[in-house]
Image: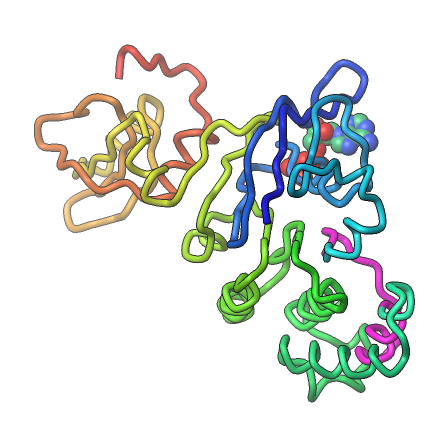
Amino acid sequence: MELRLERLTKKYQNTAAVDNVSCSLKNGVYGLLGVNGSGKTTLMRMLCTLLKPTDGSICLEGRDIFEMDGEYRRLLGYLPQDFGYYPDFTVRDYLMYIASIKGLRPTVAKKRVNLMLERVGLTEAANKKMKSLSGGMKRRAGIAQALLNDPQILILDEPTVGLDPSERIRFRNLISELSENRLVLLSTHIVSDIEYIADEIFLMKEGRFVQSGSVEELTSAMPWQVWSLQVARADVNAYQKSYQIANVKTVQGGARLRILSAKRPEDSAVPETATLEDVFLYYFGERSGMDDDKI
Ligand code: ADP
């Protein structure tokens, strides 16, 4: 199965929320990584046929998804950023309700709902009201509703917002499980949410893919080097003004800086292996007043 985006563009007035994006998606986990406002939701809403592109196309196996219409949507599961639910519904009633909207027959729906409750670990909470669930449980209920029709394509918009660290880990494991024989696309602005589970990551900035690839590809393609350098405590501010600093750690006698720079900042600086966090900082960090040539 191949979902192909070709020069996909969505303009609002004169600004492009999604600008000339092309890529090919197959089974596996894809991460859309970018700060707020970079165009992730707009791109996802087009992939769900909720928004029409201004230009370009999205094709599944060579067929335009907007022309496929219901045939395409039957293959699709979507978890929007703010998914609507009825607070006084129990988890089971909520899922049965969504199943009926999706056109599942009641007997099929009952089986699917039980299966999905099991899948996302909510069987024991099935009779709890939606409003009484923790953030993580609500998200899992949201994923369960997106999975009711056993979709081939699963699109999750910022699914980890509001989750605590243990819920995040549980969520990552669930996504990895779900990606078998499926295309999963999830958006986030948190590097650690996709670092370990995404086969391919698209770094999205101002509507464009500025870089894409596996974690290894992205880290090895970063134009700058990462350096570790110990400095006096009093000099930290000066370094922060002149360099892109990924981390400051207080150590005996000063601070150890993690510096992103094209050139060795000092003779004593030691080269380090870049992480996805460093790549994110390289593309999205503030670089005002810095001149690439001088660093
Ligand atoms: P993200 O999901 O990465 O936070 P969005 O896709 O929500 O980004 O937004 C991308 C850009 O498009 C933002 O600058 C946003 O203000 C703009 N935008 C999104 N929806 C609309 C709209 N309906 N009308 C005008 N501008 C919009």
Q: Can residue 123 be seen by looking at this rendering?
A: yes
Asked whether 228 or 96 is in front, the reply is 96
Position in image of residue 112 (x %, y %): 76, 78
Above or below, 240 against 275 in this view is above
Number of numbered discs present? 0
Above or below, 239 against 163 in this view is above
Position in image of residue 70 (x %, y %): 85, 50
Above or below, 68 against 89 in this view is above
Residue at the left extreme?
A: 267
Quadrant of the frame with the C terminus? top left
Quadrant field for ligand 1: top right
Specify the segment rendered in magenta.
Answer: 79-98
Quarter occupied by residue 15: top right
Residue at the front extreme?
A: 62
Position in image of residue 145 (x %, y %): 76, 67
Asked whether 49 or 156 is in front, the reply is 49
Asked whether 111 or 131 is in front, the reply is 111
Quarter occupied by residue 152: bottom right
Position in image of residue 99 (x %, y %): 85, 70
Residue at 45% across / 30% down in the picture?
Answer: 211
**Magenta stretch encompasses residue 97:** yes
